Amino acid sequence: MSRPRDPLPRLYRWRTNILQGPLFFLSTAGCGSLALFVSLFDPSGRLQHRIAQIWARLCVWASFSRLVVHGGENLGRCPVAVYAANHTSYMDTPVVFAALPFQFRILAKKELWTYPFIGWYLARSGQIPIDTANPRATLSSLGVGLKALRGGMPLFVFPEGGRTHNGELQTFLSGAAYLAIRAQVPLVPIALRGVYDLLPIHTRHFYPGELTMIVGDPIETTGMHMRQAEELTERLKAAIEAMRGQSTQASERSPVAHTGAAAV
């Protein structure tokens, strides 16, 4: 898939404004409202998470893109783990919810809690806001994440702390490694490809294509100490960088998260 031009051709802009944007908004409003209602009698969050998965697959479908997962067998190897991926676009979150086949908690930037419907779901379903600009608030959020892990709930984290401006990896923060080491659970690297091209940080318009999630082998943390957090963070970044550059044409595709314009 070639990189989109800036600005995008009129076809893509008109299609987003007239068709894809309204579909995205309607699915967000509908699923967000339903999740808010369900939260009144769903303390476990399972139904809310299922609704979020449906919303995410609708969003991928509305983007006219196809989502394929490689290494899906690694998603079921660890009952509890910290999953960490590169952060490329606002569409990363729908891709993650569409692809991961189990309930989890996501550590996401606090600003998302201010958005209608999306913020309401995040607040009511037990997701964890994180403010990287406030060290005290960040430490508190990590404490909530650690409690979730120890309670048997997997976590998902974007270690870069924000979206990339050019498609390349940014500096990784050590929060994912901190959580994995403190809870003594595996750290699972995930590489997202094609999502930056779909909706880069500088545009509001979709540039459809194939979206790829590559799930790497879990990195064990048993016996590791907190002084090794930086080392683990570098291992995580290196693993994601390597997966971003590898060929996946010959690898097996996971049937559990094959979504897109043709199938949801």
Image: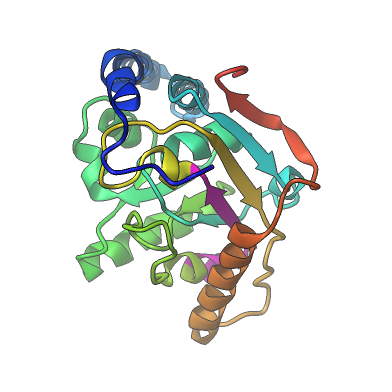
What residue is shown at x 41% (from left), y 56% (from top)? Answer: 167
Range drawn in magenta: 179-194
What residue is shown at x 58% (from left), y 63% (from top)? Answer: 240
* Any part of residue 150 in sight: no
Q: Is residue 163 left or right of residue 67?
A: left
- Dividing the picture into quadrants, the one containing residue 218 is bottom right
Q: Is the N terminus in the top left, top right, bottom left or bottom right quadrant?
A: top right
Q: Is residue 92 left or right of residue 132?
A: right
Quick one: 1 or 53, which is closer to the camera?
Answer: 1
- Dividing the picture into quadrants, the one containing residue 160 is bottom left
Q: How many marks?
A: 0
Tell me residue 223's x, y (percent): 67, 79
Tell me residue 248's x, y (percent): 72, 49
Q: Is the C terminus in the top left, top right, bottom left or bottom right quadrant?
A: top right
What residue is shown at x 28% (from left), y 43% (from top)? Answer: 6
Say if 85 sits above or below 228 in the image: above
